[in-house]
Image (cartoon, grey):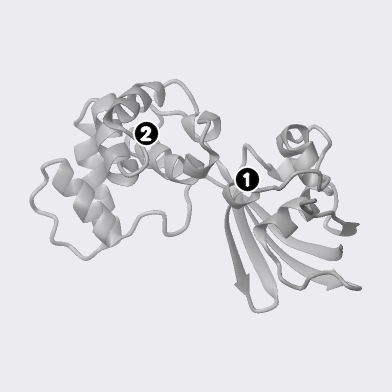
Amino acid sequence: MKYAIKIHKISTVNTLPSAWNLNDYKQLLGRFNFTDAESSDLLELEEFLFMVIGETEPNEAAAIVLDYKLSKDLSKGQIDQLSHEMLSDRISEEYPKIGLHKDLFSVNQLLYHAYNGKFLNTEATIVKFDIVALANADESITKEVVLKCFTKNLDSHNIIIRLFRDQLNGNEAFKEANDIIWDLQKEGNSYTMITSDYWMSKNEFLVGEFETSIQFFEEA
């Protein structure tokens, strides 16, 4: 399958758009025993939240935010362990379950900003681009399609290329693609993709416009 890609913009960010909403902040303030959270101003609630988080021991605050965001995915023991590890490790890049990286990133960055850098900073990559299916290629643009195309335009030392060579070559199913790419949105004729800087950093992209062929796994 062959595709043509034109990249319009690559951004490196340390917060995700709409990672936390008004209700999230109110719920979290309640968990930190802050009772006066009636405001409907997101920035004001964020200010209150950062204030009460800053008055809490870092690992205790991490446990509260982790429990709010990931209690359906992690046990209390795992949350307790991560709440300590987050102070010295980039858990949102290192945790074995790739599917949790996006939420772990949002938790980490909330704490990073609340504590003015006491937690390690992590970054995400946002790419705005056009993609066109050529010849007989499937016109359905999935995360797997985008990821396989983009890796053809990345430095050969990129970690996706090193870890998922068989999946990229179509020798194995590439289920991990849905977790490596955190979000893929179509906006008119263009797309926006969000992933971790750990998987794909701005300085790894080689050219702004290219054509490439990709392979898909077919079960025998």
Q: Which residue is mark 1?
A: 176
Q: Is residue 126 left or right of residue 122?
A: right
**Upstream in sequence: badge 1 or badge 2:** 2
Tell me what residue is drawn at x 21 percent, y 66 percent: 40
Q: Residue at x 22, y 40 (%)?
A: 51
Q: Is residue 205 shown to the viewer in this render?
A: no
Three-letter code, disc 1: Glu
Q: What is the number of callouts on the image?
A: 2
In this view, the mark in front (1 or 2): 1
Residue sitting nearer the eye, 60 or 77: 77
SS for tag 1?
loop
Q: Residue furthest front?
A: 220
The answer to which image quadrant residue 132 occupies is bottom right
Q: Is residue 136 left or right of residue 68?
A: right
Front residue of this view, candidates 37 and 151: 151
Q: CA distance from mark 1 to mark 2?
A: 33 Å
Residue at the disc numbered 2: 116
Q: Amino acid under label 2?
A: Asn
- Residue 54 place in picture, x, y as percent: 24, 33
* Residue 156, position as x, y percentages in the image: 84, 36
Mark 1 in CB contact with mark 2 (< 8 angstroms) = no
Instruction: Please name the residue shown 66% across and 67% down the image.
Output: 191
Regarding residue 202, the answer to whether it shows in the image is: yes
Q: Residue furthest bottom?
A: 188
Element assignment for label 2: loop
Residue 170 relative to residue 187: left or right? right
Up-down relation of residue 87 to residue 219 (above or below): above
